[in-house]
Amino acid sequence: MRAGADSLQLQLPLACDPGRTCFVQYYVDRDPGPEARDFAGGSQTYDRHDGTDFRLPSSVAAAGPLGAVRAAAAGTVLRIRTDAPDVSVRATGMAKVAGVECGNGLVIAHAGSYETQYCHLAQGSVTVRPGQAVAAGQVIGHVGLSGATEFPHLHFTVRRADRPVDPFAIDGSAHPGRQASLWDEAARASLRYRTGSVLNSGFSDGPVTMAAVEAETASPLRARAETLVAWVRAISLEAGDVQRLVVRGPDGRILVENQLPPLANPRAQSLVFTGRRRPAEGFRAGTYEATFEVVRGGRVVIGHRFVGTLP
């Protein structure tokens, strides 16, 4: 879409590289009824979700430079919230965030009756005030864990005349073309629709948990390890997806593999791992290669390779 008198051109609202250092976890729900469907006809949304969720690979990444939230377009700040605690809703319960589901955040007014809203920011990180003019790309806060969220991310909502608008498909079509997007050329090129992504992967010499992956505290692979574990965290998987993780030793032979049964339901995130205890002669020194695949309808939709080295 070309800019016009009543159009809005949006920049990426995070200082990250989509598909590499940040990922879209959920899109706007386009289904008018109780079902949920994103703009591309996929299941990467949930009922009545009114925005786009930009997720960072971990809590550590979210706390760093990648978590800087930027104004998606020039405008004027309407309102802000800065005092909500950074606590997962899993710990507090939904009752504690009733009425403040957005957590810390702000709303910016733009030309053409548009507004953008930025939610789940870190406590005290909002850098602007109501009535202040902001430029496109200006840092206005930082990703946090406030409001109704279980993981650090930016919930980004676009409205026009108080009604939610999907920035990927403003014309309401099921499979929109380039003319339907509010994103500018740079953002549109980087926000290619992905049918699932790998957030993190690695090797460890011990058990791996979702909490450890999120906090980047999974133990590394070390010499004389008692176990050798490969792990992958993937997001936005669909019902029927089959996940397979294979580890090959330095000699190229399969050391261990794990193939999970087809998913019964869509999965927001999935942690897959496989490993082997240290044999009597010890693990062979060298490079170990892991390959992760997600097969959907007989076709590989996610392929990911990573390596670990034992001295």
Image: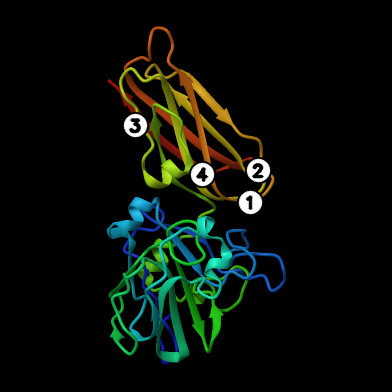
Count all numbered tags in the image, as a single digit.
4
Mark 3 or mark 2: name the one nearer the start of the chain: 3
Q: In this view, does 127 lie above or below 204?
A: below
Q: Quadrant of the N terminus?
A: bottom left
Residue 220 - label: 3
Q: Name the N-terminal-most of marks 1 and 4.
A: 1
Coloring scheme used: rainbow
CA gap, disc 2 to disc 4? 15 Å
Instruction: Estimate the spatial distance between the alpha carbons at disc 3 and disc 1, rounded to whole Å.
Output: 30 Å
Q: Do the residues labelled 3 and 1 touch (CB within 8 Å)?
A: no
User: Which residue does the image show at 46% across and 30% down from the upper left?
Assistant: 207
Depicted 106 relative to depicted 277: above or below: below
How busy is the neighbourhood of tag 2: few (under 14 within 10 Å), some, or many (20 plus)? some
Q: What element carries label 4?
A: strand
Asked if residue 174 is positioned above or below residue 56 in the image, the reply reads: below
Give the labeled residue for mark 1.
266
x and y percentages locating residue 41 in the rendered image = 63, 63
- Depth check, front residue: 264 or 93: 93
* Residue 174 as seen in the image, left or right of residue 15: right
